[in-house]
Image (tube, rainbow, N blue to C red):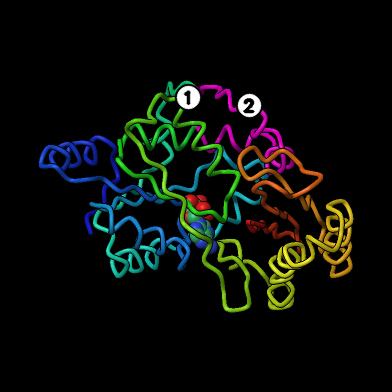
């Protein structure tokens, strides 16, 4: 695997690869890699030359403590990427992504920016768009791989690709969530769970399954209420349990079309999110 720290070097290398007809498959990450990230790399391998980036993007953290405590383990990440078949790694510094004089754009993302994650993490999606915009300009991939684990983020990036006029150039591929044996969605933040918190953490996925299994028995408000109560009773601080339209994320009162259940809740200082398609 070749590691690039400077955008110009990666750009030069990719220019040659593209000229020789290679399809560029890009997997952006913040590191502390796990099997979820590696499933994106695995999918990317089927599509072409795999470029992965590791960059803990400061502008998407609305909570400075979360940023300070974000797990970093580059040596282990490199080992996993080599074993996973990644060919190129982009490992930029903050200055490389946001050079002096970098001017911040404002992205008009519409209602998805301010709902759910957006409502609880002000500015988060603007920060995500800032870094993904920059990475897309540098890598100019044919295919971009992202995880369904971050359902709303995938929608935001689809919107961003449209705003950038790149819909004919960049194909967004959404990869299913990889879970631990007990159902917990894999996440870099899981590394920070205490053993007590780790035991409780699968309750998010259990709650989503409860909703899915009881759709015909209870109304949507009742299901959301029961889900919140169950999580709260187990010591979670619930940010939201929502049942929403799978395409717009608008909250639903009935689930006749395609819909998705989404949850965000904290145990101690660790905030977890998960989602499940309901039909
Ligand atoms: P992150 O490093 O958390 O920014 O994640 C980088 C990419 O990996 C994003 O597209 C995530 O949605 C994806 N990802 C994270 N966790 C998982 C998972 N458990 N299963 C599938 N994809 C994931």
**Residue 110 vs residue 82: left or right?**
right
Which is nearer the eye, 47 or 52? Answer: 47
Lower position in the chain sequence, tag 2 or tag 1 = 2
Q: Residues within 10 Å of mark 1 (few under 14, many from 20)?
A: few
The C terminus - image quarter: bottom right
- Please check the rendered image and state whether residue 118 is part of the magenta-colored stretch, yes or no: yes
Magenta extent: 104-129
Location of mark 1 (residue): 163
| One can see residue 8 in this view | yes
Location of mark 2 (residue): 110
How far from the left and from the top, in percent, is residue 199? Answer: 71, 77
- Please check the rendered image and state whether residue 60 is part of the magenta-colored stretch, yes or no: no
Q: Are marks 2 and 1 in contact (CB under 8 Å)?
A: no
Question: Most extreme residue toward the left, as rendered?
Answer: 20
**Residue 129 vs residue 167: left or right?**
right
Image quarter of residue 124: top right
SS label for mark 2 = helix
């Amino acid at each position: 695997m070749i590691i690039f720290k400077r955008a110009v070097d990666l750009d030069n290398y990719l220019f040659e690869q593209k000229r020789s007809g290679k399809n560029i498959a890009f997997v952006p990450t913040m590191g502390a890699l796990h099997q979820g990230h590696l499933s994106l790399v695995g999918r990317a391998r089927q599509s072409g030359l795999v470029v992965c980036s590791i960059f803990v993007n400061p502008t998407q953290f609305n909570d400075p403590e979360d940023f300070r405590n974000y797990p970093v383990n580059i040596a282990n990440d490199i080992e996993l990427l080599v074993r996973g078949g990644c060919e190129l790694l982009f490992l930029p510094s903050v200055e490389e992504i946001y050079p002096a004089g970098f001017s911040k754009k404002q992205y008009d993302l519409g209602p998805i920016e301010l709902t759910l994650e957006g409502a609880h993490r002000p500015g988060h999606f603007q920060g995500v768009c800032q870094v993904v915009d920059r990475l897309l300009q540098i890598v100019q991939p044919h295919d971009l791989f992202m995880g369904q684990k971050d359902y709303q983020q995938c929608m935001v990036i689809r919107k961003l690709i449209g705003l950038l006029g790149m819909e004919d150039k960049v194909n967004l591929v959404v990869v299913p969530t990889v879970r631990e044996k007990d159902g917990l969605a894999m996440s870099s933040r899981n590394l920070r769970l205490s053993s007590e918190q780790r035991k409780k953490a699968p309750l998010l996925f259990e709650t989503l399954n409860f909703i899915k299994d009881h759709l015909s028995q209870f109304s949507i408000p009742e299901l959301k209420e029961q889900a919140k109560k169950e999580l709260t009773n187990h010591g979670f601080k619930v940010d939201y349990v929502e049942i929403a339209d799978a395409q717009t994320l608008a909250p639903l009162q009935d689930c006749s079309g395609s819909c998705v259940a989404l949850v965000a809740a904290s145990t101690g200082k660790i905030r977890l999110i998960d989602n499940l398609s309901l039909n």
